[in-house]
Image: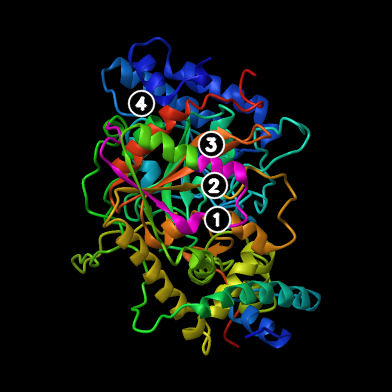
Amino acid sequence: MLTDLTIAAARDGLRARAFSAVDLTMAHLHAIEALNPRLNAFITVSHAKAVEQARAADAALAAGDVRPLTGIPLAIKDLFCTEGVRTTAASKILGPFVPPYESTVTANLLRDGAVFLGKANMDEFAMGSSNMTSSYGPVENPWKRKQDASAVLVPGGSSGGSAAAVAARLAMGATGTDTGGSIRQPASFCGLVGMKPTYGRCSRWGAVAFASSLDHPGPFARTVRDSAILLGSMAGHDPKDATSANLAVPNFEAACARGVKGLRIGVPREYRSDGMPAEIDALWQQGIDWLRAAGAEVVDVSLPHTKYGLATYYIVAPAEASSNLARYDGVRFGLRQNGEDLRDLYERSRAEGFGAEVRRRVLIGTYVLSAGYYDAYYLRAQKIRALILKDFTDAFAQVDALLTPTAPSAAFAQGENMDDPIQMYLNDLFTVPANLAGVPASSVPAGLDANGLPLGLQVIGKPFDEETVFAVSAAIEQAAGFDALPSIRAGA
Amino acid sequence: MSLDPATIRRIASLARIRVEEDEVEPLCQELNGILGWIEQLNEVDVSGVQPLSGAANMAMALRADAVTDGGYPDKVLSNAPERIGDFYVVPKVVE
């Protein structure tokens, strides 16, 4: 089936004219038609535009204009502004918003010939770890528990729609954003490769802002090589983002084949928490053994402030969110609720437009930035953030990359972890430190739990050394030979 | 530090989010739960540590102080919930 191909294989097939870009896009649009009513992975399907882009790809191929992604159909997280295509960030407050411009990351993908199938569901403003906070309904994980196939599992979040779409073969790859684990945790839950590059590697311009110092755009794909191909197109310097790094984009795809011989891989002892399920601990040990067998040297390292990462994150991220989300005023764009006066209009528009989790975080952020509390909360959190970065800097003086589990559990059922916000926040325990430090990190599918659900391992690298992250990820992928498939997928 | 209903009303007002009276008490409990959990940060010795606002380890780039974009009011206003000509419409703010 065309929908089962990797991006690398589809690229070869298109170039050899074994099938057309329109064939490939239609196969995915049919899969979306069949499965999206159930999975709810897409908020918006841009059918006509996708066909038009696929036709243009066929014309380009015929003319010999072959680019890295010509004719490859992708899902775009509904956080990236797409010119003329509604962009909601899964919030009611952006329900009517049609961007008059294209985000830099999506513009880069279009420049390289990609086809956009539509806009993927997500947690509202990327605030969540289960896709349950979307104003457009939850997303179903295409994977099922062996013993309890009727349970509807979450795909993780916040990029849950992107992950479900790629896992179910509704798209060959997808964009996501990762502020505290929003690419890596859903990748782990859905058996995919997810890559959060270094802060500054992908432009944030035109991506709806959640927490600007923590937001990282990155790709989802079914193989390490595919994720490297996607990142190669998404990345690059952008003068429109003041934090975009002015560095050349390396050949990430080539780095996948480097191997790990001679690399020093750190295993941070603080990630070994008491409550960790035995299966995840065993898989981690398996990953260590695989890398050692492939020629890497494994070293115990310490990241002493790891346990404070999550609490630090829940000050810094809400603080930045409360500032970023101040723009939703009911006046310039988005939802408006009229009131008695201007202030009442603001308050009613924002009360009506924001969901419970977004409201919670904006209020926390407002509090920790308010007069009298700024030093006790925000300034202290920024200092601990500096200590967390120093942990990584010290560790990377000894090792080339770190290996940890991605998430403390496999996918859970819709409705679980909903009673207590902190329970949900704990999903990001292992992923948040890399956002605070800005270092690149991937999640690679490495095995299944007793329920037959995928589990990922996380590879963390030095700043701007995504190449080593890809090399280590590819070695794990090769050793794991992960070939399990979700039960809900195109053609199944 | 713990939030009381008056503080919830104050921060909701600072955040310009209308909170109904029956939502104040549940919000108080939720936010206090989160802030209580965050208190663990008080264990960390941060003396002499410089705060870190972001991970981008770079100097801010400078550019010429020149207008390089704009001149398309229709695009800018295309998502306005209410407009008249090239203006956004808001409730009357001056008596």
Residue A157 in percent (x, y) is at: 58, 49
Q: Which comes sooner in the sequence, label 2 or label 1?
A: 2
Q: Nearer the viewer, mark 1 or mark 3?
A: 1
- Indicate left or right for A221 with A474 as reference: right
Which chain hosts label 2? Answer: A
Chain of residue at mark 4: A
Q: Secondary structure at mark 2?
A: helix
x 54%, y 19%: residue: A27
The residue tagged 1 is A428
Q: Which mark is residue A118?
A: 3
Q: Is residue A8 visible?
A: yes
Q: Residue at x 37, y 58 (%)?
A: A438
Disc 1 versus disc 3: distance between alpha carbons? 27 Å
> Gap in Å between the C-alphas at discs 1 and 4?
35 Å
Q: Which residues are magenta?
A: A258-284
Q: What amino acid is at disc 4?
A: Thr
Q: Nearer the viewer, residue A96 or A297?
A: A297
Q: Earlier in the sequence, mark 4 or mark 2?
A: 4
Which residue position holds label 4?
A70
The kind of residue tagged 2 is Gln
